[in-house]
Amino acid sequence: MKTDAMVAFMAFSTNPIRPVPLFGLATFFVGTGCHHFIKPSYYIDIMSSYLPMHMELVYVSDSF
């Protein structure tokens, strides 16, 4: 007996077009994560002034 979750997973894995936007989204997130370490000043500039330890928070946010 197949559950709804099993049916949804099988439909997800057999759709040939589905991986294309997922790959694009994954590439975007990995690129942005790397950019946190390459140019942290951009992310420090857009942080609110009431948050302490800007540099540390930029590095911590990259790990999530």
Image (cartoon, rainbow, N blue to C red):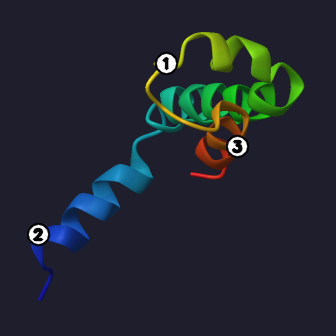
| Along the line of sight, the residue nearer the viewer: 45 or 23 | 45
Report helix, strand or loop for mark 1: loop
Quadrant hosting residue 15: top left
Q: Which mark is residue 59?
A: none
Question: Residue shown at 35%/51% (left/top)?
Answer: 12
Q: What amino acid is found at the position of numbered circle 2 in the picture?
A: Asp
Report helix, strand or loop for mark 3: helix
Q: Is residue 6 above or below residue 55?
A: below
> In this figure, which residue is indicated by the disc labeled 2?
4
Indicate left or right for 33 with 20 as reference.
right
Between the C-alphas of marks 1 and 2, the distance is: 47 Å
Quadrant hosting residue 32: top right
Q: Is residue 51 above or below residue 40?
A: below
Query: Percent x, y for residue 53?
Result: 64, 38
> In this figure, which residue is indicated by the disc labeled 3?
56
Question: Residue shown at 15%/81% (left/top)?
Answer: 2
Query: Percent x, y for residue 38?
Result: 88, 25
Q: Is residue 57 above or below residue 36?
A: below
Nearer the N terminus, badge 2 or badge 3?
2
Q: Which mark is residue 49?
A: 1
Farthest residue to the right: give it: 38
Question: Residue shown at 11%/89% (left/top)?
Answer: 1
